[in-house]
Image (cartoon, helix red, strand yellow):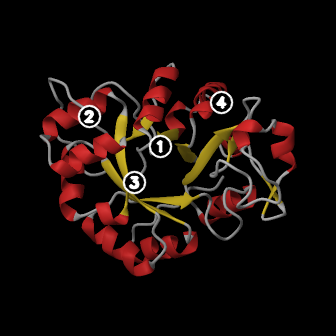
Amino acid sequence: MPSGSAPPGPAQSGSAPSGPGPSGYLDLPVPIAFAHRGGSAFPENSWRAFEHAVGLGYSYLETDVHATADGVLIAFHDKTLDRVTDAAGAVARLPYRAVAAARIGGSEPIPLLADLLAAWPGIRFNIDVKDFPAVGPLTGVLARAAAWDRVCVTSFSGRRLAAVRRALPRPVCLAASPAGIAAVRLGLPAAALAAGFARSWVRCAQVPAGVATAPFIRRAHAAGLQVHVWTVNDRAAMTALLELGVDGIMTDETATLRDVLAQRDQWHPRAVG
């Protein structure tokens, strides 16, 4: 649970807290539109899905990472290939040559995170680290791409997030751990939370819609965090969350979220060219 002394003052919605740590990832206007696994227009976490979201004007893509048995980092959600590809087996137990032969939905190759970062140098990536073997390869990929200000790392495991922080040679944006989110929900003193979050590189709370109540959003903002909500695919739910003041929405329905934001004059498309 974050703690510390000499806290900074509460940050406003959409701002990054003061103190050491990353500053670039969240410097675009809010609310942020995230294409969850690239969106549902094409198979999840496929190159075509990410390309489609970029074409719509998305500046933020959400994805997941696993490492193969030989340490190659792939953009893929599940521990096994079985659910979404024409192959089977645990990613962490397979060499990359076997994983590379698999096809998402029977047609789409599994992308490398390094290739995604290289393809769209102006795009920011929200990266969910799905297993401990991915931590080391992720560090290498980010270092080679110099992508420190272009990524936010998240995980359902506080231990994995701590391992990422220990492994990285310089700060990146991190999402709050489950313990950090619980601290916000409990209403612990905002000043102490803000100091701990800032010191730990934590810049946002990424939560399901049911957690993103008005009190939670108010407390998170007071602790210097943006609030990003996943995974919201219903137009009415998107509107309600935006009315509450969330700072970002992750969606599979990328065109729908774009339209909702545009109708509210809150769509901030990525400049082309």
Percent across and percent down for residue 182 are 26, 47
Residue in the image at 60% along x and 57% along y: 37
Residue 93 seen: yes
Residue in the image at 53% along x and 39% along y: 150
Residue in the image at 15% along x and 41% along y: 190
Task: Kindly report the distance in space between the C-alpha atoms of the residues bearing marks 4 and 3.
Answer: 27 Å
For mark 3, what is the residue?
Answer: 29
Percent across and percent down for residue 233 are 49, 73
Question: Horizontal placement of 12 versus 264: left or right?
Answer: left
* Amino acid of disc 3: Pro
Describe the element under mark 3 as helix, strand or loop.
Answer: loop
The residue carrying pointer 2 sits among few (fewer than 14), some (14 to 19) or many (20 or more) residues within 10 Å by Cα, namely some
For mark 2, what is the residue?
Answer: 1
Q: Is residue 210 above or below residue 270?
A: below
* Amino acid of disc 4: Val
Question: Upstream in the sequence, badge 2 or badge 1?
Answer: 2
Of badges 4 and 3, the one in the foreground is 4
Q: Which mark is residue 141?
A: 4
